[in-house]
Image (tube, grey):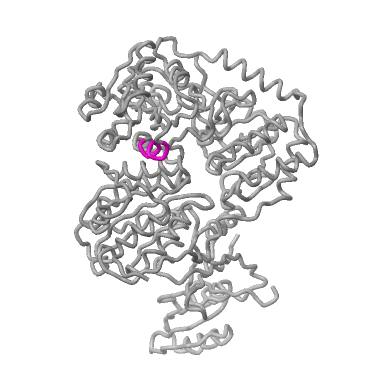
Amino acid sequence: MWAILSVLVENRPGVLFKITHLFRSRNFNIDSISVGITDNPNYSRMTITSYGDEKQIEQIVKQLDKMIDTVEVKQLDEHKTVFRELCIFKLKLSNANDSMEVNKLANAYGAKVHDVKKDSLMVELTSTPDQIKAFEELAKPFGIIDVARTGVTALQRSGA
Amino acid sequence: MESMTGAKALMTAMEKEGVKEVFGLPGGANLPMYDEFSRCDIRHILVRHEQSASHMADGFGRVSRKPGVCFATSGPGATNILTGIATAQADSSPMIAVTGQVPVAMIGKDAFQESDIIGMTNPVVKYAFQPRTPGEVPEVVKKGFYIAETGRPGPVLIDIPKDVQQNEASMEFPDEFNIQGYHPWTDPDIVACEKAIEMLLNSEKPIILAGGGTIISSAFAELQSLAETLMLPVVTTFKGKGAFPENHPLSLGPIGMHGHAEANKMMAEADCVLAIGTRFSDRSVGTFEAFEKQLKIIHMDVDPAEIGKNQTTSLAVVGDVRTSLRIMVKLLLQKAIKKTEESVWLKHVKETKDYWRENLKLHPGEMGAAKILRKLREILPKESVITTEVGQHQMWASLFYDVIQPGTFFSSTGLGTMGWGFPASIGAKVARPDVPVVDIAGDGSFSMTENSLATAVLEDIPVIVFVLNNSTLGMVAQWQRTFYDRRMVGVDQGGCPDYVKLAESYGAQGIRAQSMDELDRAIKSAISSDVATVIDIPIDPEEDVLPFVAPGTSLSDMILPS
């Protein structure tokens, strides 16, 4: 199963290292990780996505919780969570009407277009990993030169 | 508020924590701390290798249940204690390791004797601090001791850059502090305790499996009371050895790769187990699949992350095991439940125990391991503290040395660190100078830290090293005999060194015992000796440790003496 973990940590040097080291030494997988400071500068929030069976995910949560630098560890329910990822694609423009086609596709996904050149352009898409994958499939025929993704960040919906 | 250096603040804060002894070795980057020993009451115990200092602190911590403290300098001094820290972590032993570090401005410059010890120790410490200003030192020490000794104990590293030791700041020694993400104790789960009782009462073949956590939380009286009230047979893990008096009629001794035959048999037959403070290590339970067959498992542990880590359980009782056991005993008292009649199961257990105690074939020679260890048991007072090295002798100690007073047997069980037992015995003796302390050793393992004889002699710490000497890395040799068709590679110790002469060269007493009479005299002489004693006992290099559960098999598939 795919799990989204929201980990509130003390904002101190070395904490990211300890978290990633825990995944390595316990033989867990990190699918994506994103980190940012919270409104309270004493804390950072890490959003980690991981694959594993139910037992493994439960162990990851427990091991993270056991860490002294973690203040709160939650496994988020996808259906009760707003989760997004920012992705930037650099696409090839080969034919005259590619630019128009890419713009249409970007519009359909609510993406923004940047850095339009004669033979390439960039598309900035903020969406769920599924939607990003779907976009990627449709963008492939144009030719993907490069991709950069932030990894998922997430917050639980109010009242959830 | 008083102005003082970081080094002085460290010593002051440690004195406030009740530290009386530090095991260590000085070097360039911890000299300011060492200078403070000249003007404070803390005793410094000098070692000849930092690894031994960490094992001494570990031994001290296990026996006193207060963190033992070791000091090492930066770079190689720090890396030398890495094994000791990992050993303490694997066995949940409270320890404070204080290392010197290069000055703050030099960190990351590959300076002389710089090592990133924070990075290197990360997976094997409970927590690590590196104060960057002297003013942080008092709180770091306070928090460090609190983290090391509460909840599931473990080692804490305090890495102090040299300028932080040298520079002055106005110091505040806080009594209170807040560690937001650390919750060492959870409230006892009374509902789970009640369910546990129900499960035990409703099963036909219940058993208690006491792990190391039982010893760490000193739950001896509670365990005995529960076992006696419900007439439950008790097996232990190797780390839990001696959590329950091994001369008690309900005791079956340790299970595991080299567990007692009766303990392994009964564990494999049980239908419900109360597992107390254990992680279900592979060495204890064999393959998990075999272990969980038809077995309901109640898992009691202070560490919530242990629940379900290695073993799926039917019921979890999270919390300090002593508190949980006390609740169970109280509930039974309230319900006036006390079993007096022997169940069919208990009769079967006792018959099995009697059978194996009489019929397990032992080495026929006069100096067989069982005879040697039973002789030691016979002479030593029951309150004596035992440490062991790692290898065949360790498993023979598990099989043939009965622990009568709970909490007097310690071994490197998790990491299996050869060379642990001797320095650990020195730390144990510092914590308990009033009782005999014996390191049950093998020659291979003792060799690794034998230079701690200098510490034992010069610091006047008269421990006993009891060497079962087969001049072989015996456990490896046994595996080569069993699994590698007797192709013996890299195990012969060539009779080197002569341990009597070695002991004497350090100013210790050295005695060779080649018969039971000589052994008897040697043990008695060692107990009454004012200096450390090494008893060298030549044994048959072909003697195997049996029973033997081969790795990856089930507890019921034991290799037995033929």
Foreground residue, A90 or B515? B515
Direction right: furthest residue: B335
Near-viewer residue (B530 or B246): B530
Picture coordinates of residue B403 (x, y %)? 51, 27
Pick the residue in front: A143 or B388: B388
User: Is residue B430 part of the magenta span, yes or no?
Assistant: yes
Numbered circles on residues, count: 0
Q: Quadrant of residue B336?
A: top right
Where are the magenta residues, as a range? B426-432
Residue shown at 36%/52% (left/top)? B97
Q: Is residue B504 magenta?
A: no
Q: Is residue B89 left or right of residue B307?
A: left
Secondary structure predominantly adopted by residues drawn in magenta: helix
Residue B135: percent from the left, percent from the top? 35, 69
Residue at the image position 62 percent from the left and 36 percent from the top? B221
* Relative vertical location of residue B538 with respect to residue B310 in this rendering, above or below: above
Residue A75, percent from left and from top: 60, 65
From what the image shows, is residue B256 above or below residue B57? above
Find residue A103 and report its horizontal and vertical position in percent.
51, 88
Query: Relative to B245, is B351 above or below?
Result: above
Quadrant of image for the N terminus of chain B = bottom left
